[in-house]
Image (cartoon, rainbow, N blue to C red):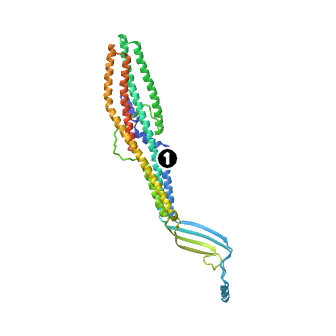
Amino acid sequence: MKKLVFLTIILLSLFRLQAQVTLDDCQRKARANYPLIKQYELINAVKKYNIAQIHKAYLPQFSLGGRVTWQSDVTEFPEAFTGLLDLLDASITFPGQDQYLFSAELSQTVWDGGITTMQKKMVAAQHEVEQQNLEVTFYTLNEQINQLFFSILLLKEQLIQNVLLQEELERNQILVASYMENGIAQQSDLDEIKVEILSVQQRNIEITTTKKSLLKVLGAFIGEKIPEEATFVKPPAALDTEKEINRPELKLFDSQVSLFRIQGEQLWSKGMPRVALFAKGAYGNPGLNMFESGFTPYFIGGVQLAWNFGGFYTNRDEKRLLENQKSQVEVQREVFLFNLNQEISQKDDEIEKLRDLLQNDDEIIRLRESVQRSSEVKVESGTMSVSDLMRDIHATAMARQTKAWHEIQLLNAVWQRKLMTNDQ
């Protein structure tokens, strides 16, 4: 029996540990469960595929070709040369008007002006922009998780305070019932307390229903069911206001500027010459010797240089366009930081206000409890009505709820402030 009791205690302890919910866990699980997380794998796969394709640009390129043509005229000697050939008793047969060519060519790029290197940089830069776009989306997800978490924390705290208020009312209900026996109180006084108890129970039902709904929503985000009895651990209220802003939007702006810079460098590489080695084998009629008719094989090998100057016509305009796009991103960054700093300043003021309010909450509660005890003594002596006592009991309960509300508000404000700089 002792072993069974001990095992039960261990299991209950483990269940309590498992039923603890923290803000960090919620954010981590929500990110892992969010459907958009699959986009990371797709972006990485596309990046690997594109880079692999770019690397193949330096592989030897092999091609086969064929051509059959008919031409209106062919190469012939002038009449003066024809007479000379007659004197020498020699003859040359020129190819006919129908000509044939079948070839195989192998080429190897030696230098492509840096275009392959720039393409790899472009793929990496585009990959970074797409990833940072996802991070911005996940940042908004954290905002939703924070809002749900602290809303549930507040509802749980309200339930705790309502339970305390109900216990206080039930204690006074017993006292008023004893006062009735002594002729100090009336049935209406007892009924008034019962109404207040029922009102508290109704509020508990409303709060519990709202809490269940929020637990379902949060559970859907993190991909698991959250039991109603789960303990929501309050995160620490410590705040380092000197932390630098580390928002994903700033990294997105940086990656966009980097992409425009690489596009500008790519303009330079497009204007560079290309050098390649090539070898071509062919079988055709005619061959390389135009004075020989019939099908003959031949081979050509060498170095090929290609330089297209067409890009220089639009290079300047394209550079100006990229500079304008970079400037637009920089302006967006400045606007973002300006608005964010204003929000941070307002949030710092809110945090300071809540901390000041909390300093007075304990003293207000102490004074309200003192007034309530004095009212209970007066009701017992018959010098105060139960209605006035109810007012003091509610004032005490309201003071406790206000403190709990301020505590959750402070935690929420602190973590909103952390989220503003992405310090989580």
Image quarter where the N terminus lies is top left
Name the one closer to the observer, 24 or 274. Answer: 274
The number of numbered discs placed on residues in the rendered structure image is: 1
In the rendered image, residue 290, in percent from the top left (x then y), is placed at 62, 78
Q: Secondary structure at mark 1?
A: helix
Residue 221, above or below 210:
below
At 31% from the left and 32% from the top, the residue drawn is 359
In the picture, residue 382 is in which quadrant? top left
- Residue at 50% across, 60% down: 317
Q: Is 392 positioned to the left or the right of 95 in the image?
A: left
What residue is at 48 percent from the left and 59 percent from the top?
Answer: 320
**Foreground pick, 108 / 193:** 193
Q: Is any atom of residue 108 visible in this view?
A: yes
- The answer to whether residue 252 is seen in the rendering is no
Q: Residues within 10 Å of mark 1 (few under 14, many from 20)?
A: few
Compared with 344, 313 (above or below) is below
The residue closer to the viewer here, 35 or 317, is 317
| Kind of residue at disc 1 | Lys
- Residue 109, percent across and down? 50, 67
Q: Position of residue 276 (x, y in %)?
A: 51, 69
Q: Relative to 420, is 395 above or below?
A: above
Q: Quadrant of the C terminus?
A: top left
Classify residue 377 by image quadrant: top left
Q: Which residue is outermost to the bottom?
A: 87
Q: Check disc 1 and report the residue beneath it.
A: 38
Looking at the picture, how far across and down is residue 19, in whole percent? 41, 34
Residue drawn at x 34%, y 32% is 357
Decide if residue 304 is on the left or right side of residue 251.
right
